[in-house]
Image (cartoon, rainbow, N blue to C red):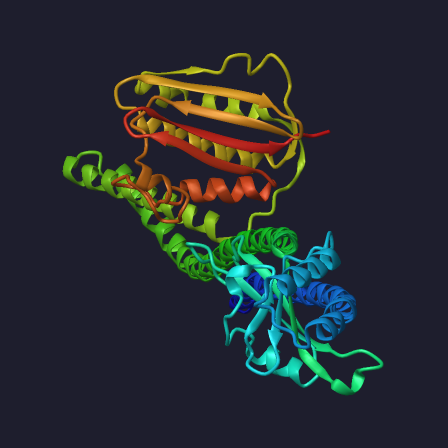
């Protein structure tokens, strides 16, 4: 049994390990979902930037053509030099730029002077004349390369990089302003800076990020919940089995102890019984021979009484110790109980105990059992009930017919049993009486269980006791 009990513990530990992995997996799944949503949103942001950058390049190529052919060349022929400080030139440039970008989702256009890096023209006139705003992208454009950067205008309360609130997102694209054929040899004339507003598109990406994370988290939570329920159910089953295993182990240990004790008691009782018979017969002989001697007669009667009591105790020991295989035969339950009541009638009258057996004899209760053993079992139950009643009381007997059993209830109005003693009442050698072996109810339990039945007690101290016996019906 110890080996089996130890086999249960690794299973319990294994499920605890599964439970640990379930929680760990849930955390990992959250991190994975978070990472997945971030990767997808970053990829979407990159695709968005590339799309708008390509859009800016197309517009910039058209703007390059329009400004070079309709502003740069005409102004140089007419004025000899370009000076956007001149109102006429500035207005012409503004007209060409605005006409080109009209309805093309371009928020702002800046044109940088090549030599000094000054903003020579801007659709936002407040920026004209400012310098140092191009950065690395401006320098790359001077070398003939285009590039873009995403800039943000932070709100009053800034969020984290994941919980990104509705910021203002701008895509700034820097494209070199080149001379076109047949003047390509001139090279780069300046730098275009095109600004596009991506705030709405970026908010859509953020919503998409939260949607992916939310859906992934919901799915993972449902999977985790299902796994957790399975683990908890398995833990409950294992605990129940471990408890049942422990009970079986305790029962087996008790059975082994009782078997060893029974062998010893049987041997000792057998050795006691023969000399006890000699003592009893000798005491009877002395009683007969002491007709004129009162003291001797009194002593002899004491010896007879005590040897009789000792003989009953030894008989109980032998009954408990030796195996009792029921000799099964057809019999009637009500007849066995009536035999007990008839035998105990003098005791019932002596203690002024009335018996209420209802309609016990109105119908037969057929069972397959050993009448002798059942008689002794019920005799012990009735004797205990009578002894628990002090000055008059009642004993009620009921037989309830169930689907596969007869349930016999024997209820007395005696002193009852304390809750603490109720747990030990069927233990061998446990007794609350001054004189007794403590084997009566242990023998009852052994006999009833030998008939594939069960016996249990319900009692309340000061109120009375009910003994319940279940015995299989005969089909």
Residue 151's x, y, as percent?
Answer: 56, 66
Q: Is residue 375 above or below residue 6?
A: above
Q: Is residue 320 above or below residue 333?
A: below
Q: Residue at x 63, y 15 (%)?
A: 363
Image quarter for residue 434?
Answer: top left
Q: How many numbered circles does the render carry?
A: 0
Q: Residue at x 73, y 51 (%)?
A: 103
Give the quarter of the figure containing the C terminus. top right
Q: Is residue 4 visible?
A: no
Q: Which of 312 and 358 lies nearest the eye of the viewer?
A: 358
Residue 421's x, y, as percent?
Answer: 32, 41
Which residue extends farthest right? Answer: 182
Image quarter for residue 116?
Answer: bottom right
Q: Residue at x 32, y 34 (%)?
A: 417
Q: Which of 166 and 126 lies nearest the eye of the viewer?
A: 126
Q: Is residue 39 visible?
A: yes
Residue 407's x, y, as percent?
Answer: 56, 27
Residue 18's x, y, as percent?
Answer: 58, 64
Q: Which of 221 and 372 lies nearest the eye of the viewer?
A: 221
Q: Is residue 128 left or right of residue 439?
A: right
Q: Is residue 357 above or below residue 381?
A: above
Q: Residue at x 42, y 54 (%)?
A: 156
Q: Is residue 236 left or right of residue 81?
A: left
Q: Is residue 265 left or right of residue 206?
A: left
Image quarter for residue 137?
Answer: bottom right
Q: Which of 112 and 354 lies nearest the eye of the viewer?
A: 112
């Amino acid at each position: 049994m110890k080996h089996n009990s130890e086999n249960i513990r690794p299973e319990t530990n294994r499920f605890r390990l599964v439970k640990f992995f379930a929680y760990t997996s849930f955390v990992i799944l959250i991190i994975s979902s978070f990472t997945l949503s971030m990767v997808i949103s970053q990829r979407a942001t990159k695709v968005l930037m590339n799309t708008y950058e390509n859009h800016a390049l197309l517009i910039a190529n058209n703007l390059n053509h329009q400004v070079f052919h309709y502003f740069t060349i005409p102004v140089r022929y007419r004025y000899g030099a370009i000076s956007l400080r001149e109102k006429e030139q500035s207005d012409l440039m503004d007209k060409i730029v605005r006409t080109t970008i009209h309805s093309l989702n371009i928020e702002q256009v800046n044109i940088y002077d090549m030599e000094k890096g000054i903003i020579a023209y801007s659709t936002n006139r407040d920026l004209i004349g400012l310098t140092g705003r191009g950065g690395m992208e401006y320098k790359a454009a001077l070398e003939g390369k285009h590039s873009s950067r995403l800039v943000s205008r932070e709100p009053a309360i800034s969020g984290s990089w994941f919980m990104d609130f509705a910021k203002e997102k701008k895509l700034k694209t820097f494209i070199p302003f080149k001379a076109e054929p047949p003047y390509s040899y001139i090279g780069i004339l300046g730098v275009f800076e095109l600004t596009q507003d991506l705030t709405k598109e970026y908010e859509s990406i953020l919503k998409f990020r939260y949607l992916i994370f939310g859906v992934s988290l919901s799915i993972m939570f449902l999977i985790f919940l299902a796994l957790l329920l399975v683990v908890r159910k398995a833990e409950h089953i294992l605990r129940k089995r471990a408890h049942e295993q422990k009970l079986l182990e305790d029962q087996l240990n008790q059975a082994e102890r009782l078997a060893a004790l029974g062998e010893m008691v049987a041997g000792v009782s057998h050795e006691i019984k023969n000399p006890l018979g000699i003592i009893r017969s000798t005491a009877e002989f002395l009683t007969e021979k002491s007709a004129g001697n009162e003291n001797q007669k009194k002593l002899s009667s004491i010896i007879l009484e005590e040897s009789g009591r000792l003989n009953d105790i030894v008989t109980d020991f032998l009954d408990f110790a030796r195996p009792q295989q029921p000799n099964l035969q057809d019999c009637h339950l009500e007849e066995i109980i009536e035999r007990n009541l008839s035998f105990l009638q003098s005791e019932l009258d002596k203690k002024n105990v009335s018996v209420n057996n209802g309609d016990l004899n109105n119908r037969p209760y057929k069972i397959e059992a050993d009448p002798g053993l059942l008689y002794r079992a019920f005799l012990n139950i009735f004797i205990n009930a009578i002894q628990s009643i002090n000055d008059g009381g009642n004993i009620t007997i009921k037989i309830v017919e169930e689907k596969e059993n007869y349930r016999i209830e024997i209820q007395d109005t005696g002193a009852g049993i304390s809750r603490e003693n109720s747990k030990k009442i069927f233990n061998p050698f446990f007794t609350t009486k001054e004189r007794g072996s403590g084997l009566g109810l242990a023998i009852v339990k052994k006999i009833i269980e030998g008939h594939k039945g069960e016996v249990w007690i319900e009692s309340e101290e000061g109120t009375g006791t009910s003994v319940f016996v279940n015995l299989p019906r005969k089909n």
